[in-house]
Amino acid sequence: MKINIVNPDLNELGYVIAIANIKDKHDTSAPSDYHWKILKCRMIIFSNSSILACPDKNDVKQVHIIFNKAGDDYDKLISLFVKFSLIQNGGIRSATPEIYQKCFHYTMTARIAPVWNTLQDNYLINNRDFLVTRGPQEAVKYCIVVNDTFTVIEVNAVKINLMLTEEEFLPGEWIRVLPSLNKAIVEDSYKDFSQGSKFKSYKNLRRHWKNIHGYRLPENESAYYSIQFWRGEPLLYPKQCVLRNFPIVIPTSQPLEKLIISRFVTCLTSKMANVLGTKLIFKLEDIQPEDSKSLAPKDCLLETQAVSLCTPTQYSRSQK
């Protein structure tokens, strides 16, 4: 299925880069500078529905923001900069399809969580309690492409099994972490939250995952793991966000596929009724068999068997 969303006139949009003040006293849910920048970006998104934004993946302080130059959106944005201790870096730039795609993508995933939860950069699981749900769960694989006229979201319905386990992870074991599925190694395990943590309580940790990733951790605590990536300091992860293997992707039947995609469209139109101050206008278009290649991952979603997700790219988010 293709969802063709009519873009605002890109010539009427402004694009600015904001710099987060990492010297601020950090909120307890964002102990690192990189997480502090992400939190500020999400605060901007949820403070003004007329703005699209995304954190820069490679810079610890930068946030990309797109706004409508008509009206008073820029004045409102400057007020938010003052409120959230952000500084505009340079002047107002032109909004290109590339930066529009990045900001639309991130804003969309922020707004539709926790109904739809991010896994890697191209899967969304339709279950608020997906972290504690065993077996296949309904999801979509998607790809966003932006041109001067449309934002095209290609969607394919699937089921995803996270392969959750009751077994404990052992120091020295290689694992995958949510949501990126990046590879890392278990440095140590803890039963007591106070050990090896920059967070003051499990409540703070739950706020971290909600504010940074949109995930809702269960109310009951479990084991914790100190996870070491290929560089940077170890990070504390709750057991629910650590996987031993890649999740399994399972194709769906055509009737179920239509139902899952319908739920996705309904949520999208509810959570993003307006884009940059204009009503969301889109049309649905069935993907023909010859078009299905655009949605197929490198290892292909075979119709006859379940397959593992493809190996992810290392993101700087896991390196901070």
Image (spheres, helix red, strand yellow):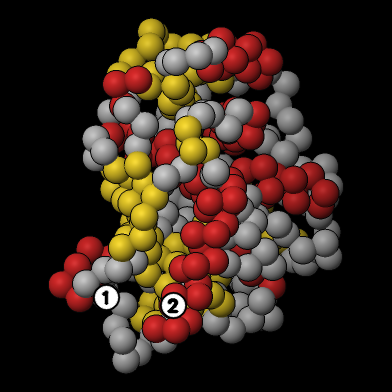
Residue 119 appears in the figure: no
Query: Toward the viewer: 278 or 55?
Result: 278
Residue lying furthest bottom: 304
Is residue 72 found left or right of 287 in the rendered image? right
Q: In the image, what residue occupies the spot 43% across and 25% down?
A: 66
Q: CA distance from mark 1 to mark 2?
A: 17 Å
Residue lying furthest left: 290
Residue kind at label 1, given as amino acid type: Cys
Q: Earlier in the sequence, mark 1 or mark 2?
A: 2
For label 2, the residue is 257
Residue kind at label 2, given as amino acid type: Glu
Query: Toward the viewer: 277 or 178?
Result: 277
For label 1, the residue is 300
Give the image quarter of residue 192. Answer: bottom right
Q: Position of residue 149 (x, y in %)?
A: 26, 38
> Which callout, 1 or 2, points to the residue nearer the camera?
2
Q: Position of residue 249 (x, y in %)?
A: 42, 78
Q: In the image, what residue occupies the spot 63% across and 68% down?
A: 127
| Residue 82 in the image: above or below residue 311 | above
Q: In the image, what residue occupies the spot 42% across and 54% down?
A: 121
